[in-house]
Image (cartoon, helix red, strand yellow):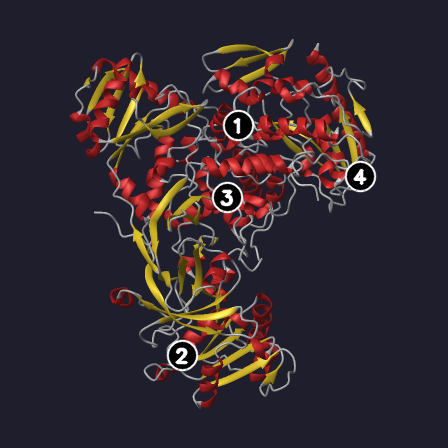
Amino acid sequence: MMQKMISKEKISDLIKELQKEFKVFGPVKEEGVVLFKEITDAKEICLDYSNSKIPAKSVLFPMIDTLFSYKKEGKGVKIIENPPYEKTVIFGIRPCDSMVFSLFKNFFSFGKYKDPLVLNRLKNITIIGMGCLEPRTTCFCTSVNGGPFNKESVDVLITEFKDNYYLESITDKGEALIKKIKSLTDADKGDLAKIEKLQKDIESAIPVIEGLDGIYTKLDGLFDHPMWKMESQGCIGCGSCTYLCPTCHCFDVLDENKQDGSGRRIRIWDTCQFPLFTLETSGHNPRTTKLPRVRQRIFHKFNYYPKNYNIIGCVGCGRCIINCPVSSDIRNIFISVENISSKTEG
Amino acid sequence: MVINIIDDIEKSIRETAKKLLEEKKVDLIIGYTKGSIPLRSGPCFITDASQTGMLVWNQSCDLNLAKYLAKNDDRKIGIISKGCVGRAIVHLIVEKQLNKENITIIGISCEGVLNRAKIMVEIGDKEIIEANIEDNKIIIKGKDFNKTLPLQDYINQLCITCHYKIPPISDIIIGNKKPEKPPKDDFKDLNEIESKSSNDKMEYFKKELNRCIRCYACREACPMCYCSLCFIDQNKPVWFGKTADISDNFIFHMIRAFHVAGRCVSCGACSSVCPMGIDLNFITRKLEKIVKERFDFESGINLEAPPPMGTHKFDDKQEFMIEED
Amino acid sequence: MQLESPYIPVLTTIKSIVRENEVNDIKTFEFVFNDEENYKKFDYVAGQFAELSVFGVGECPIGIASSPTEKGSIKFTVKKAGEVTAALHNLEVGDIVGIRGPLGNGWPVEEMKGKNLVIIGGGFAFSTLRSLTIFASHEDNRKNYGDLTVIYGNRESGEVLYRDILEEWEKRDDINVVLTIDREQEGWTRKVGFVAPIVKEVSPSPEKAVAIVCGPPIMIKTTQDVLKELKFSDEQILLSLEMRMKCGIGKCGRCNVGNKFVCLDGPVFSQAELNKLPKEY
């Protein structure tokens, strides 16, 4: 482990140094919305944010992602593969969102087929996470195996302290990276203990949702429970909870053509909340109403994920709570599940 | 004081709902309840008179509850209706999408709802931990900040120009039964955008619509978007692109707006629910103006008035027809 | 090193197109791989499917109709239903089609060795059963299986697929072929009646048997009831699920049922396996 620091005002020097070797993605504010974008000008980076509106999954799994391109010539077709992915740094991602990287690694390499787009990106990405000094009241990361300074899925963890950023290398990749950066100085040893205390204080202040770690087995018996009628009656069936969820990764595949016979096959974000998601050409739809669609979202994250990959498909960022147009709160579902299962046990 | 009126309305809503349920005049009350975060509300569905305490009424009640009504629902429903909810119900009846018999309209005199997106731009990315509305001020508390905003500046533009504070038809009215109407709607709020050059307008549209992530919250919240298969979802064959690319976004929002022209009840729900804070009303408002000017029609006001897009009159303007037949 | 992409199809050329039914909305396409190496890699079993690409229109998952024993090319029977299948129907011999596969698990041809196979199909869903029957009745494989019964029903005679091969099977004495249509029709000399009652009439013994059922939902439902009456256990009934699919490799999420993905863990499931899944298919 290596600990370094940099004064806040010099942060663009650090970004500029990174840009020499990497594509750098970081939080940027556009029209009042914070999202992760490639940083072209080091000044653009916006580190005074609680969390991005659009999660940084968009770097690994962009809203529009080219699977391959093609060119039709006469009767023939030529397939053009994507260019290799460049070395990339994701700078300033919150530790909750970075959990998604290990989650995606699990999911996209699961089974017989590996997803080359996500996995190639993962291989080439170094993650510089930024500890979360001000968790929102909607955050519940510590209930889903995360934390505001969780080191599990970052290569380097930054903690803001007074006028400085403190950088701690977590992985070898992270250590190799911060060794190279000239604008960093050795960490002020006196502050390190204070930082550790600060981290602990912030983490312990986040309320814990009881029983969430055991929700997987509790859900097993609740598939046909009337609770889903209650939980889904206000849902209007939009995709904001899933599109803005850092772990949701379902997609649609389509072809885009240009006039000249060239084109590309792309995948775009799609969601289990739309009726079309499961509508078959025959007209049959296994999930025709909102109830099974709302239930699918919960089961996929909290039952199927643990069953298949032994992880919870939720990082506790609270985006679905903040962005739901009808103020549906996923924490209420946790409470219902807990209440129902404790009743049946008792 | 606004706050007291609102408190009184809330109290009356609860009492009225309780009475309706107890007397079995309705099977279900659809109203607003408190959201789990400040300045938010959600829908609630109450069948048990003892639960009516969860009903709220305040400036965060921005959804159009008419969305939860359906023609094939044979329950007797009491619905808390601000003016635009009432307008939506009327227009849906005109379009033969609802049966009035089963619906009890509990009309509420509404003084407008908040433009949350505007507040969020003002606050930045900070979290609002507590918010209260007192003396025409929005008092916001965060972890390390306090902010007081003048209420009037953060009321939806559509609410400011709204002439229908109470539903055009109501079975019960709560609050001010003859609310003061603003002067004749002159659509002055459109002056700024209308005076822009075509290029600048395009830039403005692009800037707004570029953020769209295609979650369709606008469509799903809109009481007039009830098509069983939306044009954008047509896939046999595909009619339009479904990506979040600006050209696809542009097509979606423009055609959706066209499709609600002469039907939009100016509730502003599309803007209120947009997670990206896109002000979609800027399009619908312009169409409202065109419909008013060309057809002298406002949707959801009159059960007898045929909707202009669903009727043809021989004297309809048709200057777009270049050739005489 | 970059990973090889399972999203990229290999190129094939249409060798032949056979019109399968009178209304002409079902055609069987035969494809040869443009690169022989890709054909060698396309190592499939009956019951698997592939994603067919019409470049510029899109992809659709289709069950493989040919048997691995039919060397040199692969076949797919395609009903014109959505956009991609309509585009496929407009193609001609010599046109290029992309193929990704083989995908899915397929019929458990190894596990079924030594068993009597009762193959029951209805309508257009017979394609992977064609594959299975040809495979099991092939001279190299016939000895591995016991009795081979094929029950195939259609609404009317004009809808019967694969007439030539059905007639060949009828001539063989090691396959019991039972063809049926819903109602009497002039010129039809085989059975008349729905599939389920015909299964009851044929009354296959559950002893050392596996029933393989493919068809429209109502046929599946009624046939299952008959099989239960005949004392087939849920483990002995195999079904192939239809689900909306896109990627075909367990990533896009739409064929997720319970913790399974139909494209990856299926499409073939035993009734016993399905009993453990939510009824969301």
Question: Badges 1 and 4: C-beta atoms under 8 Å apart?
Answer: no
Residue occupying the point 44% across, 84% down: C147
Q: Which numbered mark, 1 or 2, is in the foreground of this view?
A: 1
Instruction: Give the CA distance from mark 3 to mark 2.
Output: 42 Å
| Residue carrying label 3 | A297
Q: Secondary structure at mark 3?
A: helix
Which quarter of the image is occupied by the C terminus of chain B? Answer: top right
Q: Which numbered mark, 1 or 4, is in the foreground of this view?
A: 1
| Residue carrying label 4 | B100
Q: Do tags 1 and 4 sit on the same chain?
A: yes
Would you place residue A53 above or below residue B256 in this image? Answer: above
Q: Residues within 10 Å of mark 1 (few under 14, many from 20)?
A: many
**Residue at the extreme front of the image, as rendered:** B324
Would you place residue A308 above or below residue B4 in this image? Answer: below
Question: Badges 1 and 2: C-beta atoms under 8 Å apart?
Answer: no
The chain ID associated with circle 3 is A
Q: Which numbered mark, 3 or 2, is in the foreground of this view?
A: 2
| Residue carrying label 2 | C134
| Residue carrying label 1 | B278
**Residue A345 seen in render:** no
Instruction: Give the CA distance from mark 3 to mark 4.
Output: 35 Å
Residue occupying the point 66% across, 31% down: B64
Instruction: Give the CA distance from mark 1 to mark 2.
Output: 59 Å
